[in-house]
Image (cartoon, rainbow, N blue to C red):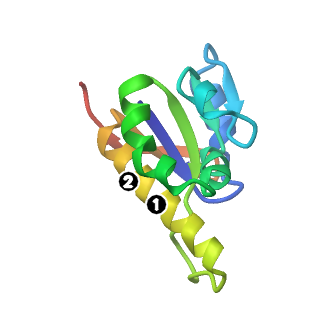
């Protein structure tokens, strides 16, 4: 698994497409959970998580299911944990859900790359 993280509009999707031209990437906003479990790559994974906030039980087990069912997936996700804490409770819940799921996925991932200004910096590299 590879997790590609970074702020908004930093070039995560373009980085992933260039690094993995052989993979088919899907939009996290449009993918179902079943499709996620079979996908080669997903960009905007945080938008998938936002859709799933209506069912918190899904989010509790999502990372472990993804690790088990699709351990070779490449995900891009926007870092949301920096800056001002949102006033709106639903925005805080979204931010927390993304952080919790991605923390678990990052711990499992072979590679975690942070993209800033279109440049990828590997912050974790392991061989499993």
Vertical relation: 33 (above or below) 104: above
Q: Is residue 56 visible?
A: yes
Q: Position of residue 29 (x, y in %)?
A: 73, 43
- The reply to whether dot 2 and dot 1 touch (C-beta < 8 Å) is yes
Relative depth, front residue between 36 and 75: 36
Vertical relation: 100 (above or below) 26: below
- Mark 2 is surrounded, within 10 Å at the Cα level, by few (under 14), some (14 to 19) or many (20 or more) other residues, namely few
The alpha-carbon separation of the residues under discs 2 and 1 comes to 6 Å
Q: Name the quadrant containing residue 76.
A: top right
Q: Residue furthest top?
A: 22
Relative depth, front residue between 28 and 127: 28
Vertical relation: 77 (above or below) 1: below
Q: Is residue 115 visible?
A: no
Please name the residue that numbered disc 1 is placed on.
99
Q: Name the quadrant containing residue 13.
A: top right
Q: Residue furthest bottom?
A: 87
Relative depth, front residue between 40 and 57: 57
Instruction: Identify the residue at image location x=36%, y=38%.
Output: 64
Instruction: Identify the residue at image location x=38%, y=53%.
Output: 103
Q: Position of residue 4 (x, y in %)?
A: 51, 42
SS state under label 1: helix
Name the side, left or right, on which 114 lies relative to 94: left
Q: In which quadrant of the rendered image does the N terminus lie? A: top left
Q: In the rendered structure, find residue 103 and report the number of the disc placed on it.
A: 2
SS state under label 2: helix
Q: Position of residue 35 (x, y in %)?
A: 63, 25
Instruction: Identify the residue at image location x=61%, y=79%.
Output: 89
Q: In the rendered structure, find residue 109 and report the number of the disc placed on it.
A: none
């Amino acid at each position: 698994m590879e997790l590609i993280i970074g702020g908004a509009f930093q070039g995560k999707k373009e980085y992933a497409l260039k690094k993995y031209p052989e993979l088919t990437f899907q939009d996290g906003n449009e993918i179902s959970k079943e499709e996620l479990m079979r996908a080669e790559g997903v960009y905007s994974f945080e938008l998938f998580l936002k859709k799933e906030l209506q069912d918190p039980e899904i989010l509790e087990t999502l990372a472990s299911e993804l690790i088990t069912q699709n351990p070779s997936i490449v995900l891009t996700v926007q870092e949301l944990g920096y800056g001002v804490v949102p006033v709106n409770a639903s925005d805080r819940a979204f931010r927390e859900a993304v952080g919790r799921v991605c923390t678990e996925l990052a711990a499992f991932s072979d590679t975690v790359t942070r993209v800033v200004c279109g440049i990828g910096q590997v912050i974790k590299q392991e061989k499993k």
